[in-house]
Each structure stands twice: as C-alpha cells, then as structure tokens.
C-alpha cells in the first residue's frame, strides 16, 4: 500500500528509529479513480427562467461540477490525489495533498496542507488547510478505494466549501473496548462557482467518534458565515438589508449523526444530516429561502471473498419558502435514491466497481409541474450507471 | 503386480501429502518485543498499537509497530486474528487514516527474520513473526 522513497535507507534507519534519534521519513502515497458512466433514464428538467425543457442530469460531484448526462463520460467520478508527508520526529509531521477531479478537467488543487503535532499520546493539533469534516466519509471522500461505493451518497446536504484553513485540536482516548476521538476546529475558507465567489468565515465545529470491535458512532456539528460575491444578484433580508456581505454574512449550520456496524461479513452504515442556511430574499423581495435540508441513507453490503455486493437507500428533502406579494407558501424538493453495486477487489491495491443508481423525484407538485420560476420539472428523476477502478499506491 | 504398483503409488502420494502438509503448516504467530520491554500486553493493547490508536506501551514508553511485507502469510494471519480484518479491510482502514492525517501504517520490514533482527535491537518496536523463528534475542508477548 505504501511506497517509501529510499526504502533501503529507511530500513537501515529503522534500527535506530525511536531510540531517541529522529529518522526523517518521506512518504509518498496516492489514489486514483477512473470511472465512466452515463444516465439511462431521465426526467424533464425545466429552466426556471425561460421554461425551456431538457433532460435531467445526475450530479455526481457537486463541488467540482461533475455531472453525468446521456452521453458516456469519464469525468464526473474520476479523480486523483498525490500525498507527500514527512515525519520530522517527536510527534511533528507535515503533509500536503494535491487532488484533481474530472469535473474540473483535472486541474490540481491543494486539498490538504498542514502541520500536525502530537502534544502527547492523547492530544493532536493540526494547522493548515484541511477537509471540513461534515460527513462520515468527508475526510476521505476522494479516496474511492476506502469505501464500497463508486461515490458516497449524494442525498446528504453539503456545504459551500469542502475545505477550510485553520486549526483542529483532536483528543483520543481508549477505555476498555471503546476508542474515542473528539475534535474541535476553527478557521475560514473560500471557493468559487463560476463567477460567484463564496467565502466561509468563522468556520467552527466539532466531531465526536466512538468505536469498538464492530460499531462506530459519530456525531458532528458545524457552522460558518457565508459571504457571497456575485455579479448578478444581491441577497437581502426580509427588511431589505443587504445580506451575505462581509458586514452581514449569512449564517449556515450543519449537524449530522452516523453509525457503521460490522457483523462478520455483513456491514451496515447509516447517516443522517441536517443543514440550514439563513433566509434570504431576492432584490424584488419575491423569493427564496431554503428553510432546511435533510438527508439520510442506509447502506448494507456483504463481503463474499473478493466481491462485495451492496445496496443503499437514500432520501433528500429540502423545504423552500416562496414569497411574493401574492404568494407565501412552502414547497418541498425531495428525492429517493436506490443504489445497487458491486465492488470486486481483483488486486491488493485496486478495486473494480460497477454501480447503478435510480432516483425518483418526490417534490411537491408546485416544484414539479408549474411552469415559470417554481417549475423545475422532474429534475431529480434520473438513472445512472457507472463502472470504474479505484487504485491506491 | 498391479496391486504392488497401486501400493507404491499410494505410499508415494501419502508421503508427498505429508511433505506438503509439513511445508504448508507453520507453528503459529508470535508477537514479539525487545527483551527489556516489561509490559504485559493484551490482545487489545496489541491491536490498538497496530491500528495506530495507541502510540505508547502501558508504561508510557513509545511503541512502534512494524509490519511484514504485504502478502506474507504471517501478516494475513495476524491481521485476521488480532486486528480482526481481512487484507482488503486493513488496506481500506489505512487509506482512510493516511489521506486524512490521522495516522500512517506501520513500516514494512520484510519477513520474520528481518522483523526479529530489528526488534532485538530496538526496545520501542513490536512485531509479529512465525513462532518457529522466535529465539532468545526477543521476547514473545502473545501467541496464537
């Protein structure tokens, strides 16, 4: 799994390692996913502004714009990462990780760049650029080899930015059969979507994880303030005060719980997440506020030698408050997704995966049928099929 | 005559079966530390050290686990019995930690003899070897 630079030198150094002397150690690791897929059945998606209709698409990787349509594509789920880390001894290490996603034409980003310091056996401090730990699988979302799916369930509500720059303090403790890990973090981040720049200020959060032989439990809470820099629109409060600005940022909160269970060769993983963004209005005071978005899934698989067939059921629900001079109503945008797949570990460091997802649109009629601003069509209804490889090295 | 040939064949196949058997069978796996390491280690302690959850022995001194080469029978046996994972699960486990800054897998240092030699020279190390390879230069703390 790992490849050392100057293996021989390190083995030689190994004999003095830990006996007070510091063995400098450079480690290079990486991961790569090559996935191809297409949608096989699509609902009707309506343009909110023009009413023009098109086929619904499947967003496989929101943050990087990886989207499947009915033409086969190898980009949405394909990605790579290269990590270089060095152990400087006495609990100090530095790590940098470059990642690239097909949705962004494999432009490289620095996903992680941090200094890690073990204060002692129980406390660790990380400073630098890190993943925002929202989901059970957030930390290693990019590393397909580390989980059974081709992509983690898309039903959970995400944040605007998946990384932040700041510090994270972690506490680890072992008692009897349980291992505990708690962390708190704080910092800031920024991202952009097209010509819209999004800053996340005052990122603050905590995660708690407890695990034993067969059970892992996780709870998390995160919040930040959003500043949106868009050339086309400005956001206002109900009272007409400009919002999502440096002076008056938009509040965002996220909470999630998850559990992973292993029973011999069968595993079950389930997760529930809730996110809410402060209510905003368009300049004409006509519309828009997502009152809250919830998502949950349950997934199970069985390891049969090198084969792991699995099934996942997931639900996503977002409530929008719509307000115009003549209308004040709530509508729900909802979908149900069933995913069937198989992972085949054909090589010690590589897995082949085939996966089929079918998603139904359970949105309110107002969101499904009406034309004009509220009519989205059956934009959630879509089937997608993918095959691919995940490799780590 | 035919009977005699049959007997010879049977005997030969029995002999080769015995031979194969003795080659395939190995005495078991021994978890070893430096002779000066006085810690009493339970299976859970060993598992925690090898999964990166503990970085020290019960007496507070630094613990550094070493792995055998990927694919070694002793390694698969150790991972399956003590860490309660199969070869693919342990890889996925370390991939999760490695790419998120939560830990790095133990160093790989070759086969049983290499592990024993390193451990005999360093009080911080802990490893596992084929029991038949254990000798006075190291201390066996757990065996299965």
Image: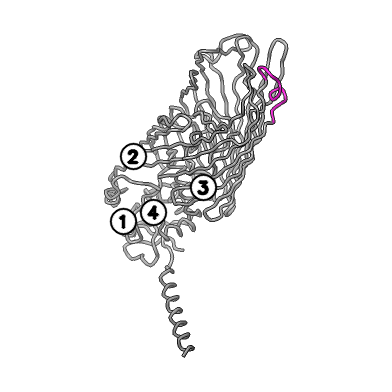
Q: Looking at the image, is mark 2 or mark 3 earlier in the sequence?
A: 2
Q: CA distance from mark 2 to mark 4?
A: 19 Å
Q: Which element type, helix, strand or loop, lies under badge 2? A: strand
Density class for disc 1 (Cα within 10 Å; few <14, some 14-19, many ≥20) is many
Q: Which residue is mark 2?
A: A86
Evaluate whether residue A200 shows in this view. Answer: no
Density class for disc 4 (Cα within 10 Å; few <14, some 14-19, many ≥20) is many
- Badge 2 and badge 4 both on one subunit: no
Q: Which residue is mark 1?
A: B118
Look at the numbered discs 2 and 4 and tell me whether their residues touch, using CB distance below 8 Å.
no
Judge depth for marks 2 and 3 and give the one in front. Answer: 2
- Badge 1 and badge 2 both on one subunit: no
Q: CA distance from mark 3 to mark 4?
A: 25 Å
Where A61 falls versus B65 (above or below)? above
Q: Which residue is mark 3?
A: A175
Q: Which element type, helix, strand or loop, lies under badge 3? A: strand
Density class for disc 3 (Cα within 10 Å; few <14, some 14-19, many ≥20) is few
Judge depth for marks 1 and 3 and give the one in front. Answer: 1
Q: Among all residues in the image, which is located at the extreme bottom?
A: B1
Q: In which image quadrant can residue A270 be found?
A: top right
Q: CA distance from mark 1 to mark 4?
A: 11 Å
- Badge 1 and badge 3 both on one subunit: no
Image mark 3: chain? A
Residue B120 percent across, percent down from the top left: 31, 58
Q: Which element type, helix, strand or loop, lies under badge 1? A: helix
The residue range painted magenta reads A362-374
- Badge 1 and badge 4 both on one subunit: yes
């Amino acid at each position: 799994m790992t490849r050392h630079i100057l293996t021989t030198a390190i083995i030689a150094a190994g004999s003095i390692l830990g006996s007070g002397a510091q063995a400098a150690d450079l480690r290079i690791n990486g991961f790569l996913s090559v996935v191809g897929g297409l949608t096989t059945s699509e609902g009707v998606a309506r343009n909110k502004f023009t009413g023009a209709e098109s086929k619904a698409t499947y967003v496989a990787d929101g943050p990087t714009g990886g989207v499947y349509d009915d033409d086969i594509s190898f980009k949405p789920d394909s990605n790579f990462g290269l990590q270089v880390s060095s152990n400087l001894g006495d609990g100090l290490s530095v790590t940098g990780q470059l990642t690239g996603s097909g949705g962004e034409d494999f432009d490289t980003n620095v996903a992680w760049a941090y200094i890690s310091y073990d204060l002692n056996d129980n406390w660790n401090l990380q400073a630098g650029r890190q993943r925002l730990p929202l989901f059970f699988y957030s930390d290693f979302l990019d590393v397909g080899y580390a989980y059974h799916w081709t992509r983690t369930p898309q039903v959970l509500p995400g944040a605007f930015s998946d990384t932040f720059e700041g510090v994270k303090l972690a506490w680890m403790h072992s008692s009897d059969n349980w291992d505990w890990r708690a962390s708190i973090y704080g910092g800031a981040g920024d991202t952009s979507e097209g010509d819209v720049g999004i800053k996340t200020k005052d990122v603050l959060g905590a995660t708690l994880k407890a695990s034993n032989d067969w059970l892992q439990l996780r709870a998390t809470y995160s919040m930040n303030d959003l500043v949106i820099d868009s050339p086309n629109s400005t956001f206002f409060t109900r009272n007409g005060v400009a919002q999502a600005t440096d002076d008056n940022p938009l509040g965002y909160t996220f909470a999630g719980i998850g559990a992973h269970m292993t029973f011999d060769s069968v595993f079950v993983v389930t997760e529930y997440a809730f996110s809410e963004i402060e209510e905003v209005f368009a300049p004409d005071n006509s519309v828009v506020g997502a009152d809250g978005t919830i998502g949950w899934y349950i997934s199970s698989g069985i390891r049969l030698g090198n084969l792991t067939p699995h099934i996942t059921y997931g639900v996503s629900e977002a409530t929008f408050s719509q307000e115009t001079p003549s209308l004040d109503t709530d509508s729900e945008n909802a979908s149900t997704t069933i995913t069937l797949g198989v992972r085949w570990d054909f090589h010690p460091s590589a897995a082949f995966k085939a996966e089929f997802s079918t998603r139904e649109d359970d949105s309110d009629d107002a969101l499904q049928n009406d034309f004009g601003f509220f009519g989205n069509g059956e934009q959630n209804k879509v089937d997608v099929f993918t095959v691919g490889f995940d490799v780590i090295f | 005559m035919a009977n005699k040939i049959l007997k010879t064949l049977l005997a030969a196949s029995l002999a080769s079966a015995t031979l194969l058997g003795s080659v395939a069978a190995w005495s078991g796996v021994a978890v070893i530390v430096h002779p000066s390491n006085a810690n009493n280690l339970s299976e859970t302690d060993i598992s925690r050290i090898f999964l990166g959850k503990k970085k020290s022995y019960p007496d507070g001194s630094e613990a550094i686990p070493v792995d055998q080469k990927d694919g070694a029978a002793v390694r698969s046996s150790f991972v399956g019995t003590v860490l309660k994972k199969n070869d693919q699960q342990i890889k996925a486990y370390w991939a999760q930690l490695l790419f998120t800054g939560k830990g790095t897998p133990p160093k790989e240092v070759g086969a049983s003899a290499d592990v024993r030699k390193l451990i005999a020279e360093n009080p911080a190390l802990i490893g596992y070897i084929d029991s038949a390879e254990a000798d006075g230069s190291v201390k066996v703390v757990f065996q299965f």
